[in-house]
Amino acid sequence: FLGAGGGNDIQWCFSQVKGAVDDDVAEADIISTVEFNHSGELLATGDKGGRVVIFQQEQENKTQSHSRGEYNVYSTFQSHEPEFDYLKSLEIEEKINKIRWLPQKNAAQFLLSTNDKTIKLWKISERDKRPEGYNLKEEDGRYRDPTTVTTLRVPVFRPMDLMVEASPRRIFANAHTYHINSISINSDYETYLSADDLRINLWHLEITDRSFNIVDIKPANMEELTEVITAAEFHPNSCNTFVYSSSKGTIRLCDMRASALCDRHSKLFEEPEDPSNRSFFSEIISSISDVKFSHSGRYMMTRDYLSVKIWDLNMENRPVETYQVHEYLRSKLCSLYENDCIFDKFECCWNGSDRQIIFHRTVTFFLPSLCSIVMTGSYNNFFRMFDRNTKRDITLEASRENNKPRTVLKPRKVCASGKRKKDEISVDSLDFNKKILHTAWHPKENIIAVATTNNLYIFQDKMN
Amino acid sequence: DTQEEETITPERAEEVKLKAKYPNLGQKPGRSDFLMKRLQKGQKYFDSGDYNMAKAKMKNKQLPSAGPDKNLVTGDHIPTPQDLPQRKSSLVTSKLAG
């Protein structure tokens, strides 16, 4: 099993599954992003239909110490709608590409959600009181005849059933010619970046009518286009630093203090390629689909088609660690190219930043984790975790067949070639339509959210 | 020759398979076919001239004969706003919230 250090092995158990049971998946229900907020109390999903669903973890019941709180629906709203840009003859999908939460400053919660062209700032607020006892209005809202008012009273707030409202507070539009793939909030909590295939823009959260272009890799002659931006993220601590990855497998780190237009990188992270290994597929499978800084900002993780790589920001010439997600697919690249699966964009994530150690249910210590585990998805509804300390890895499956809460998930194994052992699955039996592209790890606890095509699974560490 | 087979990487073997199926693959000078496709996602062409011709055809069945090729029809294959699938937003609540 996967060891989290110090004999504290994580044993993953099924907790919940959300979404329709039937196999007939409506396009709109395809989950396109999953994100915990900073406290982990809220879990947001976005889908191809432009809708956002937010789940809230219920308060921990002190008597029910065998499981952490369950996630229930808190709010759901239509974030984006389909549009047609008649001027450019461009159909704009309502699919939510990314959701990023702002840290909580007051009673309300804020998140940024984006489709291909427009970013929106949403405010999610609770209302649990309403004013009653107006002088000029009846309780149902109808106006009273003023001549019937003989006394005056002061309206008072009375409790009501909790209502959660989502309202769009800012719309950041018209700044991207190409399709937005990333948004990232700066550690200053005032600005954020949005990246499309060729450009990255810097916004201020309060200002919607302008943004600054900070990266532009569009060539003067589009025939010379060889590389596009695939992901971008701000450094977690340095508000002047961000990285962006490319379709050629490189990552560039930029410092906004160096110049207004960060076309010249401060650092270029690239693993040298073995020329004898080069093939038609090399560039495609080296394209980076996700980049994530570790919580300390010392490391970053990238995901390409077959592997996860950990980079030390101090070393540009190669990653410090490489983990093979599904190496057995290397001999299937031809068919994966034909069915377009080779272009699937998998994400990756780090374990949470705090590790809890509970003694006798009364004393809890929080230890800063060393970002020791990474998680990413694969096919057949499998997902993978790699422990950087023990170098052990595990493959688990998100399936309704493993539905019993508090039963530890059984590890899966794919048989690449040769004789298939019992309980192994052969590469040719894998279902390539069952992709896990989006996963998220609770920022503080060992709770993970795993999205299959149209279902959201929540798994928890088994508590003793 | 078994010795030759051993030196081919699995990736190269897959490339050989692919090239056998699609011999013209990768022969165009710009290797940015995937990239251009990615950039052009969502592009649906609309020609206002063709659109108006099609609209006029609906109003008045008789078109002036254009010449020998009377069966040549323009404006039928290029999408008009009416032809575009109705991209209504999902009025149904997400099943995750059900």
Image (spheres, coloured by chain):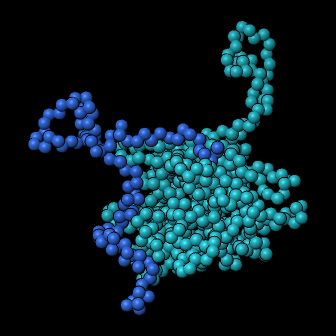
Image quadrant assignment for residue A352: bottom right
Q: Colour of chain B?
A: blue
Identity of the residue drawn at 24% across and 32% down: B56
Q: Position of residue A200 (x, y in %)?
A: 48, 58
Q: For the point 33% across and 66% down, which residue is it?
A: A224
- Placement of A441 over or under B91, stated as above or below: below
Give whichever of A96, A448 is nearer the camera: A448
Please state, as top left, top right, bottom left or bottom right, where the C terminus of chain A lies in the image: bottom right
Q: Quadrant of residue A386?
A: bottom right
Q: Is residue B49 left or right of residue A224?
A: left
Q: Is residue A230 left or right of residue A234?
A: left
Quarter of the picture containing the N terminus of chain A is: bottom right
Q: Is residue A162 visible?
A: yes
On the question of residue A314 being in view, the answer is no
Q: Position of residue A449 (x, y in %)?
A: 66, 58
Image coordinates of residue A143 in percent, x first then y, are 67, 16
Tell which of A429 and A351 is nearer to you: A429
Q: Which chain is cyan?
A: A
Picture quadrant where residue B4 is located: bottom left
What residue sits 47% from the left and 43% below the top? Answer: A82
**Residue A454 vertical position relative to residue A293 in the rendered view, above or below:** above
